[in-house]
């Protein structure tokens, strides 16, 4: 195993330890080579209970710690991320598979997130309001929610946990953190950074294992006051059902089937490389991937010619190789899922213009690589146009007009991200107003959110928003405060 990857352990109340089980572990492999990286302890329900116990014990002291003092820990974490960014990016690429350049961008996003949220230690704005009575003061203060259950995915295993952990901690909450089982090593690095920065024991607890055991144990413990989850929509439905029964706060960032509209007046020199990146970066394993490209009829043929030529030129391989743009899928199961959908697309009548298979060369056949795949003649009723494949597969559709393109864009159960390429300001603003999505781009692909703006979707893409100022809203409760300093006996009806 590369030394940039930390050794796997649970962290419960500051204690690094193995699982309380009979020694059960699960394997983590490099998706580009199949190399075994580590055998990870598989936590039990008892381990999760102990982690929640530790979070509960630590809550009073941590929540009473002044927010600027909490912020100093986040600033230290940020500085360590900045200093170690190259080593962290290498570790991320080895475990998750994405190209090193993408991993480095993710590490930098993690740094940006931590530093942005750390500044909230001296803000966390609330407000004062005039009272309807004389000699009475009204204001709103923020209080932490309590113990937070944080469950994160493998496709952004560094930045997404920091989207959640940093605001939860700055607001005075304590955390039980379960990372995805495919990427627990880089997730453990996050915990180690906070420990090195001086975070008190028990504030951030770390448990690894399958969602059916560890996730369910977090979800079903009534002491957990909020669940923050990023993952696929089916699991999100399950989490929402349990949370509703417990009247618990939640943020659910789920799937996407994101449209990119290419208008007939688009600058194709700009649009082609951007849509290629939106579709195929991280091997299409992004909830914001631009997997549905809707092109106006007059330029459809030209767009297809250039897009296919661009897909053919993409450099696919081990993310640690210089110049590689697209890495592998995360697991063999993920590759089999992609293969299944490619077969479905062909059966439904869509036409493959490029890709649609594995690589046979010696190096790429060792990992979970799949060719970037371009479907033309797709229609919106096809599964490849409606289901989140989470792989390097794009469905291209033809539209008769911008209005027709917007109709096609909205005919999906998802509503996370959307984009349009156009020189016409009317088309741009029309799409922003009418496309049903939580994020909208003009002359940029569907990826590339910035940490100071809210991130999230509508419909089956989730519930709530992350990042930006709203992150503090997620992890605090507002308390209304009324102070009567008249020292007068008022009538019972406050007259």
Image (cartoon, grey):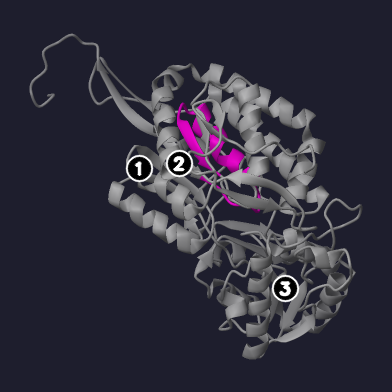
The circle on residue 221 is: 1
Picture layout, residue 206 above or below residue 28: above
What residue does disc 3 label? 263
The answer to whether mark 1 and mark 3 are in CB contact below 8 A is no
Residue 149's disc number: 2
Query: Residue 479, how many percent across, how many down?
Result: 33, 29
Q: Residue at x 49, y 62 (%)?
A: 233
Question: Answer yes or no: do the residues labelled 3 and 2 have beta carbons within 8 Å?
Answer: no
Task: Using the numbered discs, state the Cα–Cα distance from disc 1 to disc 2 in whole angstroms.
Answer: 10 Å
C-alpha distance separating marks 1 and 3: 50 Å
Left-right relation of 416 to 246: right
Q: Label 3: few (<14), some or many (≥20) within 10 Å? A: many
Report, in whole angstroms, how far the alpha carbon at label 3 lies from the one at label 2: 43 Å
Q: Which of the two residues, 140 or 486, is positioned nearer the viewer here?
A: 140
Give the SS element for disc 2: strand
Nearest to viewer (mark 3 / mark 2): 2
Question: Tag 3 or tag 1, which sits nearer the N-term?
Answer: 1
Circle 1: element type = loop
The answer to which of 418 and 490 lies nearer the viewer is: 418
Q: Position of residue 30 (x, y in %)?
A: 75, 53
Foreground disc of the pair 1, 3: 1
Q: Residues within 10 Å of mark 2 (few under 14, many from 20)?
A: many
Quarter of image, res 450: top right
Q: Which mark is residue 103?
A: none
**373 or 109, nearer to the observer:** 373
Query: In the rendering, at what x and y percent does residue 134 appear?
Result: 24, 17
Q: Is residue 267 visible?
A: no
Q: Secondary structure under badge 3?
A: loop
* Number of dots carrying numbers: 3
Q: Residue furthest left?
A: 492
């Amino acid at each position: 195993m590369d030394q940039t990857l930390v050794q796997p352990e649970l962290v419960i109340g500051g204690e690094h330890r193995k699982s309380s089980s009979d020694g059960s572990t699960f394997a983590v492999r490099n998706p580009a080579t199949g190399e075994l990286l580590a055998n990870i302890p598989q936590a039990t329900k008892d381990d999760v209970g102990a982690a929640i116990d530790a979070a509960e014990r630590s809550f009073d002291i941590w929540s009473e710690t002044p927010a600027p003092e909490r912020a100093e820990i986040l600033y230290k974490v940020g500085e360590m991320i900045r200093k170690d960014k190259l080593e962290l990016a290498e570790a991320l690429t080895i475990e998750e598979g994405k190209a090193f350049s993408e991993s480095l961008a993710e590490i930098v996003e993690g740094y940006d997130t931590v530093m942005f949220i750390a500044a909230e230690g001296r803000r966390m704005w609330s407000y004062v309001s005039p009272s309807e009575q004389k000699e009475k003061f009204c204001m709103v203060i923020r209080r932490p929610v309590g113990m937070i259950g944080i469950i994160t995915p493998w496709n952004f295993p560094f930045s997404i946990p920091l989207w959640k952990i940093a605001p939860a901690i700055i607001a005075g909450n304590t955390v039980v953190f379960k990372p995805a089982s495919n990427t627990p090593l880089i997730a453990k690095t996050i915990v180690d950074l906070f420990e090195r920065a001086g975070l008190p024991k028990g504030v951030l607890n770390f448990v690894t294992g399958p969602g059916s055991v560890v996730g369910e144990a977090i979800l079903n413990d009534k002491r957990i006051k909020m669940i923050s989850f990023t993952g696929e929509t089916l699991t999100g439905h399950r989490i929402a059902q349990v949370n509703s029964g417990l009247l618990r706060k939640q943020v659910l960032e789920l799937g996407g089937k994101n449209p990119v509209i290419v208008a007939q007046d688009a600058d194709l020199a700009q649009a082609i490389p951007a849509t290629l990146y939106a579709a195929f970066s991280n091997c299409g394993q992004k909830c914001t991937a631009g997997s549905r490209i809707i092109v106006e009829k007059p330029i459809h043929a030209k767009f297809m010619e250039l897009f296919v030529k661009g897909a053919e030129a993409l450099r696919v391989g081990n993310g640690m190789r210089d110049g590689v743009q697209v890495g592998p899928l995360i697991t063999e199961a993920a590759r089999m899922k992609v293969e299944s959908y490619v077969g479905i697309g062909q059966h439904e009548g869509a036409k493959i213009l490029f890709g649609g298979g594995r690589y046979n060369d010696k190096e790429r056949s060792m990992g979970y690589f799949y060719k970037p795949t371009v479907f033309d003649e797709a229609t919106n009723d096809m599964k490849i146009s409606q289901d989140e494949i989470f792989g390097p597969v794009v469905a291209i559709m033809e539209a008769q007009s911008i209005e027709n393109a917007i109709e096609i864009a909205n005919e999906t159960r998802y509503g996370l991200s959307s984009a349009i390429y156009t020189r016409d300001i009317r088309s741009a603003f029309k799409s922003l107003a009418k496309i049903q999505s939580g994020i909208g781009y003009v002359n940029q692909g569907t990826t590339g959110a910035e940490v100071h703006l809210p991130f999230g979707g509508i419909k089956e893409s989730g519930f709530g928003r992350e990042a930006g100022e709203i992150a503090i809203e997620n992890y605090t409760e507002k308390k209304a405060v009324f102070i009567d300093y008249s020292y007068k006996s008022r009538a019972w009806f406050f007259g």
